[in-house]
Image: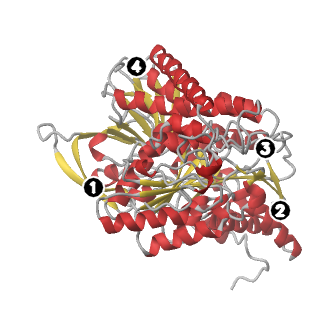
Amino acid sequence: MAGTNPFPLSRDELLKCYRTMGTIREFEDRLHIDFGRGDIPGFVHLYAGEEASATGIMSHLGDGDRIASTHRGHGHCISKGVDVVAMMKEIYGRKGGACNGKGGSMHIADVSKGMMGANGILGAGAPLACGAALAAKYRKKGEVAISFVGDGASNQGTFLESLNLAAVWNLPVLFVVENNGYAESTSRDYGTAVDSYVDRAAGFGLPGITVDGTDFFAVYEAAGEMIKRAREGGGPALLECKMVRFHGHFEGDAQTYRGAGELDSIRADQDCMKKFRAQVTAAGVITADEFKAIDREVLGVIENAVKEAKAAPLPTLADLTTDVYVTY
Amino acid sequence: MPTASRTDTPSIGIIANPVSARDIRRVIANASNLQIADRVNIVLRVLTTVASLGVPRVLMMPDRGGIRAMLQRQLRREHNLHHTFPEVEFLDMEPTSTVDDTFLAARMMRAAGVRSIVVLGGDGTHRAVVRECNDVPIAGLSTGTNNAFPEMRESTITAMAVGLYATGRLTPEQALVQNKLLAISINDGERRDIALVDAVISTDRYIGARALWKTESLSALYLTFADPQAIGLSAIGGLLHPVGRREAGGLAVHLSDDPATRRLLLRAPIAPGMVREVGIAHWEPMPAGQPFPVALQAGVVALDGEREMAFDAGDRVRITLRENAFPTVDVARCMQTAAREGLFRLSSSTT
């Protein structure tokens, strides 16, 4: 009946997940504007449109669980609990950033949160996640590791080798293929011989499933079962999230490879936040006004992060030789 | 879009779902996962077989799950090898990677006048095709999880039966059989859908990962047929009170975890490799045409294994069995008739 909660998360947890997705969306949409203005050095790859995947998966993780992210890593960082001010400073190349402004968008890391880093090298996160999973297996605390890759990076040798390694060592690792349909600007049909990512797992004897990555609850439920299985010694698995990205591969990408009207259509029909709001308000658990209040709150959080980032000092020449070697 | 009906050209359609057998039951129940390469091999076998029987043209649903891309590569290789294939035309539609693709493809194939649609999928895919293809007979190939509806059979044989029917060697009376379905209506038709095997009422109230596997959430099952050899939730009915696919009527089973209202405990394979105990309160026959009101106040209706329609207090859910609802190609009967009538004999020898 309307008012009772039909979802597998409490009202507070639903609010928290929405806040996380909203923070990612606002963070990315703000970067889209600031990068276009020339405020930001380097390169950014935005995660807007894909929030349900990171949030649905990370809702099952604690700080002791480690993730290896991709070049499109802001959403993974935020949902894993990395401070957005530290992230913004990092992207702006300022001191006080998550890596003191020396990593930038593609190398944000916060090991205290289990975030081993975004990664500019496609497919490079998978072996790192296997390493973290091997450590977790030895520590015997039931921790897991998650490797995120895009559909393009799943063709990299490192990814395929990692599937093999994870299978033979029975590692507590979940491989998440975030399939947004384009390897940069190359469509799957053109660049991938078997464009079912689940078949990659099957080739190594691992279970793999495909979910609608624009449906938070589909991701949440599937990832929950797979992560629980990994924690209990059931071994590695692969989750393919079929999703959409709202921006180009990188900022400045003219996106000439997209079909006519494709962006308008996916923003209208496949927006994971719209779907979340529609399902939760229809069930009467959270009102549209409560969602709007979170949207306003998030706007303030990101505005503040940008202000702090712009006000923070740039690294000095002396900083160049610090933090070169780090042990954890 | 190939809308013009080409009745002079006996074309058939193929709808191959790239994401059937991809849900969470791979993880919780070790269910099979038919790889894309094998799905493409099945399509290739259907194509060569219907070509050998004189079907010149096949319409296919395009997809973004890998079948179209791999099939096109394979067809180029087959062309280089000078193998005989029918003309393969992909429907002019933009795939969305949702069930809407199946709905649209079924409608387009019907509009194009195909004689039959070969379906690669499980119960859910077949349901989606039947919902939209109306009176076009379908021929099912099991590439799903439970596959209670499509019969397990080598695709070559199914394609032979389809070829015989599509080319007019067998009449509709010889080749086709009518099937039952369940019509689900919420609030007197405000929302409608169908199920080919089972409509299951669950206390879950969200769609999530779609598959149902938690027996404690089950409230009632409505079944068109109940086969003791089936897997999936229809197996509960199959092992309790079998009802044949071709028999009149269906079966309603009411479940209960409460020992006070439970009449018996039954063990059934509710998913591949997953034999579970379920509490049975009572069961009753479902005569055709009689709407069965759903007693549960709020929950979800799962159609052929997938959570589809959430409902709340105040929603009136009715489930009605319909007989003679849609035709399928009766492959076994087609092949027996073909053998008896010598349709595959190329000479007149009687020995």
Name the residue beneath numbered marker 2: B86
Rounded to the nearest angstrom, the CA distance separating label 2 from label 4 is 54 Å
Question: SS class of the residue under badge 4?
Answer: loop
Q: Measuring from the top left, give residue A127's x and y in whole percent.
A: 53, 66
The amino acid marked with disc number 1 is: Arg
Q: Are marks 1 and 4 on the same chain?
A: no
Q: How is the image coloured?
A: secondary structure
Seen as rendered, the residue at the extreme front is A318
The amino acid marked with disc number 2 is: Pro
Q: Measuring from the top left, give residue A312's x and y in whole percent.
A: 58, 33
Seen as rendered, the residue at the extreme top is A289
Q: Is B181 in front, or is A157?
A: A157
Chain of the residue under the numbered disc 2 shown in the image = B
Q: Does residue A78 appear in the picture of this structure?
A: yes
Query: From the viewer's perspective, is the residue at label 3 or at label 2 nearer?
Result: 2
Q: Residue placed at 83% from the left, 72% from the top? A: B77
Name the residue beneath numbered marker 4: A284
Name the residue beneath numbered marker 1: B276
Rounded to the nearest angstrom, the CA distance separating label 1 from label 2 is 46 Å
Chain of the residue under the numbered disc 4 shown in the image = A
Circle nearer the N terminus (3, 1): 3
Q: Which mark is residue B113?
A: 3
Question: SS class of the residue under badge 2?
Answer: loop
Quadrant where the N terminus of chain B sits is: top right
Circle nearer the N terminus (1, 2): 2
Q: Measuring from the top left, give residue B306's x and y in whole percent.
A: 46, 43
The amino acid marked with disc number 4 is: Gly
Seen as rendered, the residue at the extreme left is B260
Chain of the residue under the numbered disc 3 shown in the image = B
